[in-house]
Amino acid sequence: KARVEAGKYVDADEVKVAAFNKARVVRDALMNIPERLAAVLAAETDAARVHAMLTSEIRAALEDLVGAS
């Protein structure tokens, strides 16, 4: 009991809810990439540029996740 009062442990249900919410944020951020890029990528003929745009969008989504901690 002393460890709980000292903040050494966290409630398992709270951790599960937090993990679920974080996963939902990641899912939503990644699923929004096609909406933002579909038209641009459809018009792009340079594969390296397509790769760079996708990489940039995925990186930004993951960085937003870290910033939202």
Image (spheres, helix red, strand yellow):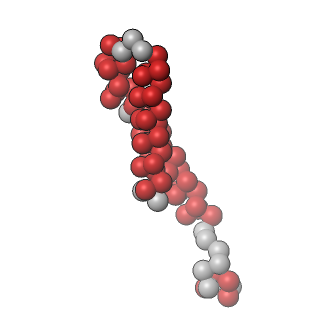
Q: Is residue 60 above or below residue 46?
A: below
Question: Could you tell whether 60 is left or right of 7 in the image?
Answer: left
Q: Residue at x 43, y 56 (%)?
A: 67
Asked which quadrant contains residue 10, the reply is: bottom right
Is residue 47 shown to the viewer in this render?
Answer: yes
Q: Position of residue 33 (x, y in %)?
A: 39, 31
Question: Could you tell whether 1 is left or right of 55 in the image?
Answer: right
User: Foreground residue, 2 or 66?
Assistant: 66
Asked which quadrant contains residue 54, the reply is: top left
User: Foreground residue, 25 or 33?
Assistant: 33
Is residue 30 shown to the viewer in this render?
Answer: no
Q: Quadrant of the N terminus?
A: bottom right
User: Foreground residue, 58 or 46?
Assistant: 46
Q: Position of residue 17 (x, y in %)?
A: 53, 56
Q: Residue at x 45, y 48 (%)?
A: 63
Asked which quadrant contains residue 37, the reply is: top left
Q: Residue at x 32, y 13 (%)?
A: 43
Q: Position of residue 52 (x, y in %)?
A: 45, 28
Q: Residue at x 36, y 15 (%)?
A: 44
- Residue projecting furthest to the bottom: 2
The count of marks equals 0
Question: Could you tell whether 10 is left or right of 36 in the image?
Answer: right
Question: Could you tell whether 4 is left or right of 62 in the image?
Answer: right
Q: Is residue 2 above or below residue 21?
A: below
User: Foreground residue, 68 or 59?
Assistant: 59
